[in-house]
Amino acid sequence: MSDITSLVSRLATLGFADSPVEHAPVDTVEQWAEALSSTAGLPAKFTLTKTLIFKPKQPKSEPMAPVVVIAKHDSPTNSKSIGNELKLKDLRFASDDVLRDVFQTAKGSVSPFALAQVSQESIAHVRVVVDKALLSESSAAPIAFHPLDSSRTVFISVATLQAFLKSVDGLVHLTEMDFVADAAAGTKVEKKTTAAAATTEPKDEGGAAGMTKPGIEVSKDVDFPTWYKQVLTRSDMLEYYNVSGCYIVRPLAYFVWQQIQEFVDAGIRAMGVKNCYFPMFVSKEVLDREKDHIEGFAPEVAWVTRAGSTELAEPLAIRPTSETVMYPYFAKWIRSHRDLPLKINQWCSVVRWEFKNPQPFLRTREFLWQEGHCAHMTKNEAMVEVRDILTLYRRVYEELLAVPVIEGEKSEKEKFAGGVATTTVEGFIPTTGRGIQGGTSHYLGQNFSKMFEIMVEDPEATGSVRPKHLVHQTSWGLSTRTIGVMVMIHGDDKGLVMPPRVSDTQVVIVPCGLTVKHSDEDRRVVVDACLNVEARLRAIGVRAESDLRQNVTPGDKYNHWELRGVPVRLEVGPKDLEQSSVLSVRRDTHAKAPLSLSGLESSVQLLLATIQSDMLIKARKTLDERVKIVLSWDTFVPTLDDKCLVLIPWCERIECEEQIKVRSSRAAQGDEPEDEKAPSMGAKSLCLPYKQPTNPPLVEGETKCVQCGENAKRYALFGRSY
Amino acid sequence: MSDITSLVSRLATLGFADSPVEHAPVDTVEQWAEALSSTAGLPAKFTLTKTLIFKPKQPKSEPMAPVVVIAKHDSPTNSKSIGNELKLKDLRFASDDVLRDVFQTAKGSVSPFALAQVSQESIAHVRVVVDKALLSESSAAPIAFHPLDSSRTVFISVATLQAFLKSVDGLVHLTEMDFVADAAAGTKVEKKTTAAAATTEPKDEGGAAGMTKPGIEVSKDVDFPTWYKQVLTRSDMLEYYNVSGCYIVRPLAYFVWQQIQEFVDAGIRAMGVKNCYFPMFVSKEVLDREKDHIEGFAPEVAWVTRAGSTELAEPLAIRPTSETVMYPYFAKWIRSHRDLPLKINQWCSVVRWEFKNPQPFLRTREFLWQEGHCAHMTKNEAMVEVRDILTLYRRVYEELLAVPVIEGEKSEKEKFAGGVATTTVEGFIPTTGRGIQGGTSHYLGQNFSKMFEIMVEDPEATGSVRPKHLVHQTSWGLSTRTIGVMVMIHGDDKGLVMPPRVSDTQVVIVPCGLTVKHSDEDRRVVVDACLNVEARLRAIGVRAESDLRQNVTPGDKYNHWELRGVPVRLEVGPKDLEQSSVLSVRRDTHAKAPLSLSGLESSVQLLLATIQSDMLIKARKTLDERVKIVLSWDTFVPTLDDKCLVLIPWCERIECEEQIKVRSSRAAQGDEPEDEKAPSMGAKSLCLPYKQPTNPPLVEGETKCVQCGENAKRYALFGRSY
């Protein structure tokens, strides 16, 4: 009795005293790590854990002898080995009943603290297995546990854990195990399944061992938000950062961005645009110059108020976009019509402190983009440029990312704050049925040139004092959002599917078919063949890589590279070489085909080109199927609920757009709660497509607006959106 | 009497009432504009002015009749035309005596307010000429004047100025003139000298008309700081920004940066480094992790404390560099020795809020750079990389920018805060005799990996629980400072001198030799020839451009492109074409040589290559002449005063370095006051060069330190520096 009390009290001093940090409830270690990544006030470094409860097969007569395993989150806790260690038969995960009745806890919330809740009768029969890795951690990193509840985390020093275990020892039967060494030993026996160590564990472990699993644990169609996070983080494209709303763009993703940069830079250079760099800081006075414009951004502006320990006389804004940063200097640089057109662009990051739910690449507080700003003599010149840029953006999506987009004009309500007209390329995410703005090119008219007095003497005019002429301006931007759209559209349950043109690795070469029967010589022949293929492909500019890792099975290599979306895998084995060929496997279709070693260069290039175009064709087919012409309001919301976008004859009135949002959202209550930016997901106009439907044709003065019945002006694309 | 009093009082209400803004005293409009550019609380836009006082040739008998000209800063106030307008002979700038005795003012401080100080006897004889451009300004932009003192500025509305003039009218003889139209008329007569309109003005105008002059007004050797500013701003490389310490990198300069980016990216990719992007924000907790490191940066860190109208729970730092941003993730990503080496780089801007005198490119509060961060298993691997990167940096300076640098190691005092060793490439600015750090590559040792627990299991070790091994890290960076160094070293009194490899325009083609005698047909032939040459050169990748502007004389085109440093000018005239050749003019040497049209491609390519290497050779010769071996303290400071760097046998002790700084600065009191970063310019160690002098050789245990007499370890490079 006193024992259990002392245990409880000691537990108290450990867990509940240590005021745990609060976070969203989590089911998997993955989610746990993510939840903590956006939680403040954590230790610099800590070790995540899993606490597993097993039950051996035993006669009903005997008192239940559950096994509590306290392990490092990524230790391969193989139930069979544990059983062997404890001489217990057929160890299985304990049922929910056992968790509830014996430990008064539930899956996901299991922790050592559950021991405190075991009745005195039962406690004596409980066996505790603790992971050596937790105790031997030379690092002083504290250890993280859920105190009985997966929405809270406490951090306990190794010393404290040991103290706790000491106290438990004697009360319960305590064992230490070295799971890593154990698994290693295991692999010697069954080489083919090293990484399988984890997967042999019962699935109902709640994914606690997730971090050791290379792959994606949820289906894209079942849990899209989790799928998206897992694809990005596990493919090493992106890392969550300890400042909420900010993310680390890792090399795999940054490579895509650099491909886009090269493509866009070449395109705009041909248009006479020159790159430059303006400071990231804007004085309040300048930022406020253009009222409509600033109203659009003010709530999201980040302010620098201190440098070192010195308060700044005037706080400085970090640019959310650079119109007001640049245009005072346009006024200075543009003295005469001969200074026109002025065309500049900058690659930089901008900061928009959104308080809405951030999403990697799609909505982040700092993001990378390109912003072009031009001044022209005439509206016509400006408009031509606006469309040329939009075409360039469409080509980035279609030719590089294999993503189809719809070109059009934004409605009055959706256009850029302070501009006259906004043109846009709109993408579509089939899994959620939502549209997404892909890039915008604005005609600013003379609105900013009036505010900033960017004017020249009218060359047409005569007389000594010529009338001033306000310039016509444009601005246009494309951001790293492109990467998120690409991932969402092409990815599958195995991970990323990369379009060849933007994939850092286009071809991975994997030696395989080598068994214990093969000699070192056989192995060397295969490895040499791999390196030879790699060299030949690199020689023609294909980004090829051989994966010659010794300690990893071919199967694990396949998973590794499929997760990263590498377009083509070439398998090279003794049998293939006998046929003087290699086996190619497409990431997008999984189609396999042997490729003869002779002429391999051209066949691989052809294959990459085919994959690139097939990906676009497939995505466009889906888009075409999911954009529906809707001619009556009754079918409007049902079509959206079908995860489609709708094309409707529309009156183009702001009031009507607002009504559409309301009427479509009420119907959609509670949908997609993960995205607060689209509260209950009312539909909004995505664009007025340049390519207008012809069947049925829209007849001016006859065709009515689907929502309000007024005369329709154009077909408009409406949808739920990001 | 009452009149003059009312004038004075009205002046009071204009000028002194309007609480003028304070700034550094200025002598030229250029300096004025710059001073205001870093002054807070100015009107959004304003017109700078010049107030000039002339005196006609007149009999001593007559009362002096000075002429006060109030004009837009850039109006071509041609004294001859003013004389004609007023029927006054030989108008000349009034002597200092006149300014003092009649107007109680002095050059640089002259303003309309001086009229208030003219005695009643004299005021009646004063003539005032006002620039129509000031009155007709359609814009409501206020007009800037110095209220009797060039360190203050008041802003007056056009209306107020008119009111003022009304009040003056009657008291003085008032005339309005349209200087622009006047100059335009003038040019029709003497076409060849359009831009000369300005230069015909007396030089002692104090550069007030500076902004209309295309060229550089001061000699590089006479007033280096002003020369540097003028070269940067007038060549359109850089623009001053309204946030002090921040500058706009304009296309001409950004192009150089992009060339450097391409070169460095290719180099590091070959080393296996991958590009990525980390957020610009750092939490305080993370920033503070490494003490020595943060001490080095804390005083200069900019803090974001507010987003929109919301105070942030925790202020966020803007990265001054990314060690502490990245390394927590290194700890996460590096799980095993197989994850090593980890090599990443990012191109970004960083913010260091220096309170010292900022200098474009050399010391700015935000600057662009590249920062590489790598983790290795062994010290040796890390050191090899550190040197490979340093070599890459040297090649950027030598091969791209034609700037010679000295490679070496930083002293204990000068090394990177938190690192173990810093290697550096040091440049030299001959005009000031000062050294400048060109780029650094650090070996961080295990200092950061210890702080951030970046460790792997030692693969050498055996046993089930392997000891942890801390990784060896490096970090290295190159910034836009490179551009400033290039400009300072190569520029001359005509402006920039660009190394061909980084010049946006490599060859400019100018049609010339066309006079009124020539027919339109003749003109067309020449123009076609220019375009043909341009096309041929572009076809082989030479960045060539034809300047076919009609309204600009060849002479002005020469100035325009020389100011921008274009390496080669090709003059194409009827006579050249008769010889089927063009005339080439080198920007660096001004050497002229005809180039045959046949084989022009190769001869131009050869010429560009020659210029590139000649520029480096020339700069290196200067550097070699100005690095002196000094063997006794007596000659140490005199050699520095000779604008040289010194190589001394040195003990390498911090105390000794500090003594050297003190002893060399006392001697240099008041030198180079424009740079507060080097207070009274004491010398510091620039590096311990890898290439050690051999004559005289340094004998361990024998050779003594030049300053303290202790045993010298190595020759060290000391100098005054930026």
Image (cartoon, coloured by chain):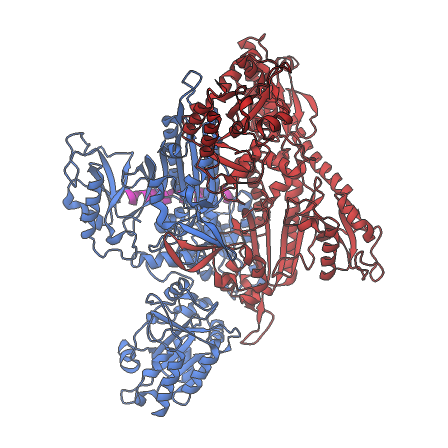
Chain colours: A red, B blue
Asked if one can make out residue A239 in the rendered structure from this viewpoint, the answer is: no
Query: Where residue B280 sits in the image (x, y, percent)?
Result: 47, 46
Task: Give the image quarter of residue A79.
Answer: top right
Location of the N terminus of chain B by quadrant is: bottom left
Query: Where residue B124 sits in the image (x, y, percent)?
Result: 35, 89
Query: Relative to B112, does residue A27 appear above or below in the rendering?
Result: above
Task: Find the residue positioned furthest to the front.
Answer: A1
Q: Left of A31 or right of it: where is B635?
A: left
The residue positioned 48% from the left and 67% from the top of the image is: B44
Could you tell me how many numbered marks the image carries? Answer: 0
Q: Is residue B289 magenta?
A: no
Q: Left of A661 or right of it: where is A227?
A: left
- Front residue of A192 and B284: B284
Helix, strand or loop: magenta stretch: helix
Task: Give the image quarter of residue A25.
Answer: top right
- Front residue of A110 and B442: A110
Q: Left of A163 or right of it: where is A379?
A: right
Q: Which residues are magenta?
A: B598-623
Query: Where residue B403 sits in the image (x, y, percent)?
Result: 36, 44
Q: Is residue B612 magenta?
A: yes
